[in-house]
Image (spheres, rainbow, N blue to C red):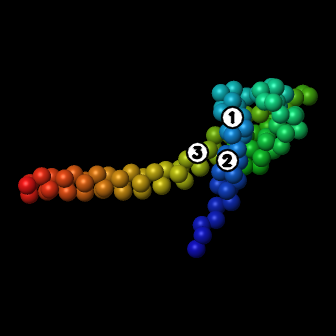
Amino acid sequence: MVERLSHLDAVFGSLSDPTRRDILKRVSRKSMTVGEIATQYPLTFAAIAKHLNVLHRAKLISKERRGREQVVSIAPDTLLAASRYLETYQQLWEHRLDSLARFLKTTSTNSKGSR
């Protein structure tokens, strides 16, 4: 049975684009207006707005209206949930690699002793 975690599908889907990853990195340092973000890329304002909407739907960023401007900030809770999901696989592979290292060390020690 396939595990369906649609919120993670949206997160990882949004992170698959290098422009969106870069936007996320920028707003992780400081909140920025949509206009400030748009000036950083050789894309149309509409293209940046689409990227921001993808990130917003995935709940990776929040948007707040301040007067005539829309301010974009990172939403760290969503990244934390994705990180926790990936940690389970990291722990699994670290355990497997540790087991392999122990096996190889034992095999290496046994082969040296039989010479």
In this rendering, position of residue 60 left or right of residue 92: right
Judging from the image, what secondary structure is the residue with disc 3 in?
helix
Neighbourhood count class around disc 2 (C-alpha, 10 Å): few under 14, some 14–19, many 20 upward: few
Percent of width and height locating residue 8: 65, 55
Percent of width and height locating residue 13: 69, 51
Judging from the image, what secondary structure is the residue with disc 2 in?
loop
Residue under the image location 91 percent in, 28 percent down: 68
Q: Which amino acid type is shown beneath numbered disc 2? A: Ser
Badge nearest the viewer, 3 or 2:
2
Residue under the image location 69 percent in, 30 percent down: 26
Judging from the image, what secondary structure is the residue with disc 1 in?
helix
Q: Which amino acid type is shown beneath numbered disc 1? A: Asp
- Residue 22, numbered circle: 1
Disc 3 to disc 1: CB gap under 8 Å? no
> Toward the viewer: 24 or 110?
110
Q: Which amino acid type is shown beneath numbered disc 3? A: Leu
| Count of numbered labels shown in the rendering | 3
State the quadrant of the N terminus. bottom right
Q: Earlier in the sequence, mark 3 or mark 1?
A: 1
Task: Examine the rendered structure and indicate whether residue 76 appears above or below residue 57.
Answer: above
Residue under the image location 30 percent in, 56 percent down: 99
- Residue 80, numbered circle: 3
Residue 51 shows up from this direction: yes
Can you tell which quarter of the image residue 43 is in? Answer: top right
In this rendering, position of residue 10 left or right of residue 47: left
Cα distance between the residues tagged 3 and 2: 17 Å
Task: Examine the rendered structure and indicate whether residue 114 appears above or below residue 44.
Answer: below
> Toward the viewer: 73 or 100?
100
- Residue 16, numbered circle: 2
Percent of width and height locating residue 97: 35, 53
